[in-house]
Image (cartoon, rainbow, N blue to C red):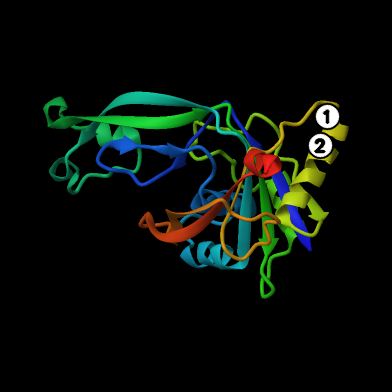
Amino acid sequence: MNYLIFQLQAPLSAWGETAVGEYRPSANYPSESALIGLFAAALGIDRSDENQHQKLRNELSLAIGVQSAGRLLRDYQTAQVPGRVSLKNRPHRTRSDELNIPKDELNTILSTRDYRQDAACLVAVQTKPDSSLSLIDLAQSIQQPKFVLYLGRKSCPPSLPLWPQVIAAENALLAMEAYRVQLADKSGEVITPLERLVWGAGINAGVKEDLQVVRKDRLLSRVHWQFGDRPEFVALLAQAALS
């Protein structure tokens, strides 16, 4: 079985969880919807193209090898925004347009956003039998993306090349370990081992789960920012090695 493996590392990353009010939390590893968005950006798929996003979601299975969860960074923000009445019948395509109203019609909103500092992971991608997208084509697109790639938010560019590789292996975990060996040979550095393996339905992880969780990151509509629940499986690799 072939797997596409690539790395994600950045000084800051933000993998959005369910937001309540003005608080925007972040998981410590990528969500399914964030990875689908990353693939869409690499392939040049516009955010408004719902059909192509759904196609990617339905044709790909994913696993994530967490090397480091990073450290939490919490950012407190204030911003000025106009009310809906003030924007009525006014152009507001840009931030400048939004603020081009009398100052007393601007409101101040407060928000808190979480980021992860120096988090790192490997991602394994497997195509389903009826997929029209090849792993080689996806790897080439990640290597030379049509749109800029970032790790959750535009302020979070990757710090290292993603270095996508298609690897033949019995399962996702073995493919990731083979990738680590290749990356170590290429860079001449020791590559951080995996702490956890996280995966969704439809991919051969190569290890039994220690727990199952429900994550609300199943993309329903990119345009309307709607997400559904899906099961996710987690294996604690350090614990598995000791048992």
Question: Residue at label 2?
Answer: 183
Q: Is residue 54 left or right of residue 5?
A: left
Q: Residue at x 17, y 45 (%)?
A: 84
Q: Is residue 205 left or right of residue 109?
A: right
Q: Residue at x 88, y 34 (%)?
A: 185
Residue 136 horizontal/vertical position (percent):
77, 57
10 Å crowding of disc 1: few (<14), some (14-19), many (20+)? few
For the N terminus, the quadrant is bottom right
Please, which residue is most extreme toward the front here?
A: 243
Q: Amino acid at mark 2?
A: Leu
Quick check: 38 above or below 118?
A: below
Q: Amino acid at mark 1?
A: Ser
Residue 156 horizontal/vertical position (percent):
53, 32
In-front residue for pair 219/51:
219
> Label 1 near label 2: C-beta < 8 Å?
yes
The disc placed on residue 95 is none
For the C terminus, the quadrant is top right
The disc placed on residue 187 is 1
Q: Is residue 148 visible?
A: yes
Helix, strand or loop for disc 2: helix
Residue 145 horizontal/vertical position (percent):
66, 46
